[in-house]
């Protein structure tokens, strides 16, 4: 993103030949990752544990998140190198995670299996696509908004299909047992930090971005938590979304970090995609139509709240064309039109 932004700024400042611009884009695309494959997989494990700790934090569950995240991280590492297998990768990952959770992880850890197989699928969750699609629809970009929402719903259905297949493979699965005691109020905040470090390692971010990204994630979580305590989860999602555009712009101006580097991780922090996958899996797999519809309505309201908040926050950044202290420019003097020298001209 930084290399692409530098190229765009250069093209705005001077004329860049087409061949040179194309060569620069090719170099950006072929740039090697900053960290080794093992470090990238570790980043995915941290992402999984961080999201899981924010949703359901117990000691056995955290161990299950780490093991399942390691498996999906390795699967993505090898699956991304096969272009033909990228389409089936979400389904395969959902099948394996669901089967392992039902057969081994849930019974061994004495956890409900359904809380274990959502966080390992974090890389496939289309939370940002759902929210950005709603924003595009709200701003009048109907075609791109509908296309983005359709793509997000398709990913949710693919993941739900994988969960369904994994469930059907183990019809006589053992019960998960009674869940353990939660770790405490500090666990979700530790999950935010783990999520941030996971982003840094998995997406090959430069080390100087660490403080800015962790700070942005903690501020988003704090604003969402305070606003939720004040007026409910819908207002919490709205407040967090409203803060996001000005905060991302502020970070970009002071650290020269592209605002997308802060924007998208904070979208994942709000995890509307995880709520959507939970609702779809409850309806398709568990047959809990009432609970699934409630979760689905919650997801729609959350996405709409985040989208509205982002629109308001982006609107507050727009400066008026004429400030109050700026003198009004004088109107140009009217120049009389030349007299017609020939009839009809």
Image: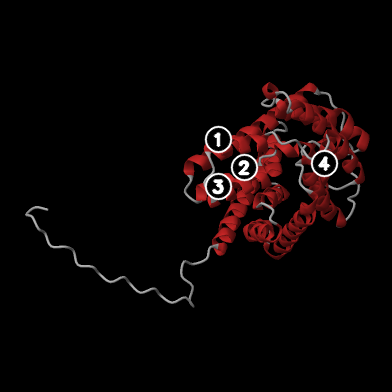
Tell me the residue at 91%/49% (across/down). Answer: 181
In the displayed structure, would residue 296 be above or below residue 251? above
In the displayed structure, would residue 105 be above or below residue 302? above
Q: Are marks 4 and 3 in contact (CB under 8 Å)?
A: no
Q: How dense is the environment of label 1, judged by Cα within 10 Å: few (below 14), some, or many (20 and up)?
A: few
Tell me the residue at 83%/33% (across/down). Answer: 37
Which of discs 2 and 1 lies nearer the camera? The answer is 1
Which of discs 2 and 3 lies nearer the camera? The answer is 3
Viewer-closest of 68 and 46: 46
In the displayed structure, would residue 85 be above or below residue 16? above
Q: Is residue 1 visible?
A: no
Residue 268: x and y in percent read: 71, 47
Q: Is residue 157 left or right of residue 116?
A: left
Callout 1: SS: helix
For residue 43, the mark is: 4
For residue 11, the mark is: 3
Which of discs 4 and 1 lies nearer the camera? The answer is 1
Q: Which residue does the numbered mark 2 point to in the structure image?
A: 129
Q: Which residue does the numbered mark 1 point to in the structure image?
A: 19
Q: Are marks 1 and 3 in contact (CB under 8 Å)?
A: no
Tell me the residue at 82%/52% (across/down). Answer: 193
- Estimate the spatial distance between the alpha carbons at disc 4 and disc 2, rounded to whole Å: 22 Å
Q: Is residue 28 left or right of residue 196?
A: left
- Estimate the spatial distance between the alpha carbons at disc 2 and disc 1, rounded to whole Å: 32 Å
Of the numbered discs 4 and 2, the one sitting upstream in the chain is 4
């Amino acid at each position: 993103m930084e290399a692409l932004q530098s190229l765009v700024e250069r093209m705005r400042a001077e004329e860049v030949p087409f061949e040179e611009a194309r060569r620069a884009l090719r170099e950006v695309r072929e740039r090697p990752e900053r960290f080794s494959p093992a470090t990238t997989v570790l980043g995915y494990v941290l992402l999984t544990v961080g999201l899981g700790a924010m949703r359901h934090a117990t000691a056995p569950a955290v161990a299950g998140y780490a093991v399942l995240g390691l498996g999906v991280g390795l699967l993505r590492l090898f699956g991304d190198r096969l272009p033909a297998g990228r389409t089936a990768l979400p389904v395969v990952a959902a099948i394996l995670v669901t089967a392992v959770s039902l057969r081994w992880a849930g019974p061994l850890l004495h956890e409900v299996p359904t809380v274990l197989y959502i966080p390992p699928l974090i890389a496939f969750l289309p939370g940002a696509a759902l929210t950005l699609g709603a924003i595009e629809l709200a701003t009048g970009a109907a075609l791109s908004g509908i296309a983005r929402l359709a793509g997000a719903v398709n990913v949710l259905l693919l993941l739900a299909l994988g969960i369904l297949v994994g469930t059907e493979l183990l019809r006589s699965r053992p019960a998960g047992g009674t869940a353990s005691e939660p770790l405490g109020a500090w666990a979700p905040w530790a999950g935010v930090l783990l999520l941030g470090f996971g982003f840094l390692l998995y997406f090959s971010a430069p080390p100087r971005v660490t403080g800015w990204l962790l700070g942005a994630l903690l501020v988003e979580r704090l604003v969402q938590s305070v606003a939720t305590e004040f007026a409910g989860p819908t207002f919490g999602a709205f407040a967090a979304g409203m803060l996001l555009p000005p905060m991302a712009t502020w970070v970009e101006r002071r650290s020269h970090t592209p605002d997308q580097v802060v924007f998208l991780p904070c979208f994942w922090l709000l995890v509307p995609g995880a709520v959507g996958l939970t609702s779809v899996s409850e309806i398709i797999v568990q047959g809990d139509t009432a609970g699934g519809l409630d979760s689905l309505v919650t997801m729609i309201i959350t996405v709409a709240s985040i989208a509205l908040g982002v629109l308001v926050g982006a609107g507050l950044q727009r400066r008026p064309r004429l400030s109050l202290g700026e003198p009004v420019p004088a109107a140009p003097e009217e120049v009389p039109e030349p007299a017609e020298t020939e009839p009809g001209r």
